[in-house]
Amino acid sequence: MAKSYCLEVSGDFACFTRPEMKVERVSYDVMTPSAARAVFESIVWKPAIRWRVTKIEVLKPIKWISVRRNEVKAVVTTRNVQAAMRAGSGNLGLYVENERQQRAGLFLRDVAYRIHAYFELRDPGFHKPHFPHLSNVPINRGEDDLLALPENNTVKFMNMFERRAFHGQCVNQPYLGCREFACAFRLVEDLKNEPRPIDVTKELGWMLYDLDHSNSSDPKPRFFPARLDNGVVHVPAWESEEVRG
């Protein structure tokens, strides 16, 4: 396994939305692996690497807040965008006054987590549908071939992440579930002097792990049985039997 990194993230609010709640937003009790992965990717993401979250530590008591707020209920559809591109023109605007709706949400407040993750190399050709400039890169190569590629230098990616995380730099602002809930982060280098997680142990039920993009045209959610064990959620490997679609 590659070197593991630890980030401490904190924020005033968080919402790790349960997908089974279709009308009102309701958060999971703790951060999901996909949200933790997104924090690492906001600091360093490349087509050649994939972040794997191994552990999430909860540092503050779980507190809730109910908020009613205005949201825009519509989105610009891909079909309309494609039609406008073919025609050379089109109206893709959304009028907030016409599409506004009020929704309630059950969010987390005053949260802090320590998230542990490492990255591994992946074939950059995996992203061909989204990155056409990679189309000349063959796919399904072995790990040795990937390591031999000059652009896939593991040390380079490690230095890049450590430099950015240490200085608090990021490509886009990390957030806690919803983009409006921005968070602060810092690189934890010595765990000996860090506070212990909360002393809570309980079952969290089936939690969203991440989306399976093996079929890019129809990504599927995958779940795992989450458990808070003395304030720690141990995240199983993506390929393990605990992770199910």
Image (spheres, grey):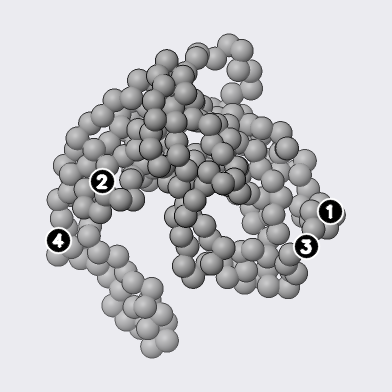
Secondary structure of the residue carrying tag 1 is helix
Question: Which amino acid type is shown beneath numbered disc 4?
Answer: Glu
25 sits to left or right of 178: left
Q: In the rendered image, which residue does mark 4 sit on?
A: 97
Q: Compared with residue 229, is residue 137 higher up or lower down, i.e. above or below?
A: below
Q: In the rendered image, which residue does mark 3 sit on?
A: 141
What is the spatial separation of the Cα atoms under label 4 and label 2, in whole angstroms?
21 Å
Question: Which amino acid type is shown beneath numbered disc 1?
Answer: Asp
Label 3 packing within 10 angstroms: few (<14), some (14-19), many (20+): few
Secondary structure of the residue carrying tag 3 is loop
Q: Quarter of the image holding residue 62?
A: top left
What is the spatial separation of the Cα atoms under label 3 and label 2, in whole angstroms?
41 Å
Label 4 packing within 10 angstroms: few (<14), some (14-19), many (20+): few
Residue extending farthest to the front is 241
Secondary structure of the residue carrying tag 2 is strand
| Image location of residue 168, percent across then percent down | 55, 32
Question: Which amino acid type is shown beneath numbered disc 2?
Answer: Arg
Q: Are marks 1 and 3 in contact (CB under 8 Å)?
A: no
